[in-house]
Amino acid sequence: MQTRTLGTTGPQSSALGLGCMGMSALYGDPGDRAECLATIHAALEAGITLLDTGDFYGMGHNELLINEALRTAPAARREQALTSVKFGAQRAVEGGFIGFDGRPSAVKSFAAYSLQRLGTDHIDIYRLARVDPDVPIEETVGAIAELVEAGHVRHIGLSEAGADTLRRAAAVAPIADLQIEYSLISRGIEERILPTARELGIGITAYGVLARGLLSGHFERDRQLAAGDFRAASPRFQGANLHRNLDLADALRAVAERKGGTPAQTAIAWVLAQGADIVPLVGARRRDRLAEAVGALDVTLDAGDLAAIERAVPADAAAGDRYPTDQMALLDSER
């Protein structure tokens, strides 16, 4: 497994991370529990060390799943694992999202519950899921810094933060990485956020690298999404937008086939090629999809390949926003 360092102050991580959200929530029915556990074990065996979760994924279910996977993994693999945890999203009993809380007291309370569910004495990277507009980022980061000083957290991360927020946060304490959506069809970070992160020595953990399945090569045009699958409300999966985006996926498939790889591998390899400071998160919840994603590490893209991919999927070619309007308004990275 190739490795990369998260920023100038963060830990060394595998070049790919495993995003565990889909094993508990938001893609309709949770994945098969036994297969999800086997997938985490397979990821660890393949050398993937970075496990990404959120305390609100299944309202704690995902952290408990990771706890079980790590407890039942070989000791050597368990000791190499890094936990990346998002916090702050508030949910109703019915499952809806009802706000974000970045107050210092809430930060410490969220952390206490996550440590208990994970069954560990520390979280490797701890991050606010969305910037709380009612709490200065300095206060939220300062609270995480106190958790670092106490030994409960190893590194501070951010999620979906804009360039100005990155600067303010980094003035308080070292920031290891920014978790943010980045893929061939979500390239908004390239103008200001990515250059600012690099200036400040902040790494990137990129989620959505397969555009929630649009670029995977496995999404059928007539597919009916399951009840509870959040993609049903995503503008990129609606009507003409969906067909336009799948046209882009078809164009990517043609490039991938010429390279002897799959669309998913090519899309992941493209993100890997954007800089050694970027770690893509792959959201596999089955071992076969994980194996395909790991295969991206064997895909080498030269200048000609990158140019061909750009022609197939130009920047700003995606149809539709990456979130519904009300959720876009919550993204500090889009301001």
Image: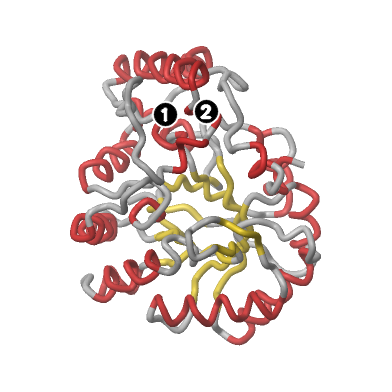
Q: Is residue 33 left or right of residue 267?
A: left
Residue 49 % position (x, y):
37, 61
Secondary structure of the residue carrying tag 2 is helix
Which residue lies at the image location 50% right of the left edge and 45% below the top edge? 207
Which residue lies at the image location 54% right of the left edge and 63% below the top edge? 92
Which residue is more in the foreground, 1 or 235?
235
Which residue lies at the image location 71% right of the left edge and 43% below the top edge? 329
Q: Which residue is mark 1?
A: 214
Secondary structure of the residue carrying tag 1 is loop
Q: Is 225 located above or below residue 124 in the figure?
A: above
Residue 223: name its quadrant.
Answer: top left
Which residue is more in the foreground, 146 or 97?
97
Which residue lies at the image location 27% right of the left edge and 21% below the top edge? 260
The three-letter code of the residue at mark 2 reads: Arg
Residue 178, which numbered label? none
Q: Which residue is mark 2?
A: 236
Counting other residues with Cα less than 10 Å from the Cα at mark 1, is it few (<14), some (14-19), or many (20 or more)?
many
